[in-house]
């Protein structure tokens, strides 16, 4: 029959205590963690910004972005965008022109500026970003068009807003 030494028994007890401690820490982390939806909302608030009635020069591109589609959903303008990256958080700013050419229906030009924050990774990512455009909707009639131009690009998309 095998005899256990005191040091082997104490080492086993220590290992059991370490595992128990790790389990307790893990359970506590689960109970105190934020839910993913609130994390996304907090992240989105810092990465997506709408600048209403921009009267400065035409915004300059920081990083390339492809605009795939645009649509209104209530008072939000949703843009499907694609860009290179994957290692850093990217931010987007949408500038609306302050000049309104009086035509019916009005057409508002906006510029989308993408900042990759120095991300040199080369994955090609596609995501939908949303801009709260309540102020823009309040300025125009119940029917208008938004012309979205990615800064530094010759491509653009025009999307219609019609109040419900």
Image: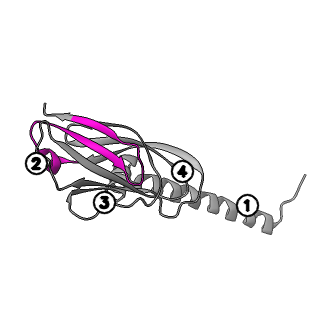
Task: Give the quarter of the image for residue 119.
Answer: bottom right
Determine the CA span between mark 1 and mark 4: 50 Å
Identity of the residue drawn at 51% across and 45% down: 125
Counting from the top left corner in percent of width and height, residue 41 is at: 33, 51
- The residue singled out by tag 1 in the image is 12
Discs 4/3, front: 3
The disc placed on residue 58 is 3
* Residue extent of the magenta highlight: 133-160
The tag on residue 84 is 4
Q: Earlier in the sequence, mark 1 or mark 2?
A: 1
| Mark 2: secondary structure | helix
Side (left or right) of 4 relative to 99: right
Q: Quadrant of residue 93?
A: bottom left
Task: Please tell me whether residue 149 belongs to the stretch shown in magenta.
Answer: yes
Q: Furthest-top residue in view? A: 164
Residue drawn at the location 58% of the way across and 59% of the way down: 120
Label 1 vs label 2, nearer the camera:
2
Tell me the CA gap for discs 3 and 2. 21 Å
> Between marks 4 and 2, how big is the CA–CA gap?
35 Å
């Amino acid at each position: 029959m095998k005899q256990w030494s005191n040091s082997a028994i104490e080492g086993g007890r220590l290992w059991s205590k370490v595992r128990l401690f790790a389990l307790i820490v893990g359970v506590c982390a689960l109970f105190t963690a934020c839910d993913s939806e609130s994390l996304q909302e907090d992240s989105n608030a810092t990465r997506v910004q709408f600048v209403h009635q921009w009267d400065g020069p035409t915004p300059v591109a920081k990083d390339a972005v492809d605009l795939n589609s645009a649509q209104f959903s209530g008072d939000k303008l949703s843009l499907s965008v694609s860009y290179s990256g994957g290692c850093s958080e990217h931010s987007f700013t949408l500038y609306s022109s302050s000049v309104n050419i009086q035509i019916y229906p009005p057409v508002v030009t906006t510029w989308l500026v993408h900042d990759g924050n120095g991300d040199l990774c080369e994955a090609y990512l596609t995501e939908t970003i949303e801009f709260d455009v309540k102020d823009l909707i309040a300025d125009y009639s119940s029917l208008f068009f938004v012309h979205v131009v990615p800064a530094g690009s010759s491509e653009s998309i025009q999307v219609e807003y019609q109040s419900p």
